Amino acid sequence: MKFLARSLGLLLVAAGFVGLVIDGTRSIVNNVISFTPLDGLINMLVPGGVPNLQMRVAQRFYPWLWDSFFAPFLQLPASVTGFLVGAFLLWLGQKSIEPIGYLAGR
């Protein structure tokens, strides 16, 4: 399980870095700081992504949950979010540290 967390974390950190380079290039060209929001990335990757997600959240859970939690979360920059989630997964998947001072031969 730790291997899966480390692998997915490494992929997300790399994707976050690539997204940050793309956003930085777009900001330099347009002469305005701009980031790709998470909902824009979801809409680009999944057809009908955010409206379908909103409908499912409103049906299965409470409609106020979309407005209070999911909508602000989806406005975060996709590159920074991917980097932070990837760093968290790398932290979760790290190997345990051997204690110092114990004999290994017993």
Image (tube, rainbow, N blue to C red):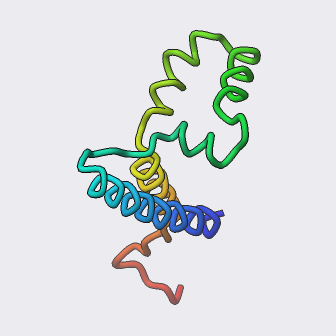
Q: How many marks?
A: 0
Vertical placement of residue 95 versus 87, above or below: below
Vertical placement of residue 72 versus 42, above or below: above
Q: Residue at x 24, y 50 (%)?
A: 31
User: Toward which corner of the image does residue 16 lie, by quadrant?
Assistant: bottom left
Is residue 44 toward the left or the right of residue 26 in the image? right
Vertical placement of residue 66 versus 76, above or below: above
Is residue 5 toward the left or the right of residue 59 in the image? left
Q: Residue at x 33, y 44 (%)?
A: 34
Q: Quadrant of the N terminus?
A: bottom right
Q: Residue at x 50, y 71 (%)?
A: 95
In the rendered image, the residue lying farthest to the bottom is 105
Residue 41 image point, x, y percent: 56, 45
Residue 6 image point, x, y percent: 55, 67
Q: Residue at x 57, y 10 (%)?
A: 64
Q: Nearer the viewer, residue 26 or 52?
A: 26
Residue 67 image point, x, y percent: 52, 15
Residue 45 image point, x, y percent: 65, 49
User: Toward which corner of the image does residue 56 lie, by quadrant?
Assistant: top right
Is residue 45 toward the left or the right of residue 102 in the image? right
In the rendered image, the residue lying farthest to the left is 31
Q: Nearer the viewer, residue 10 or 55?
A: 55
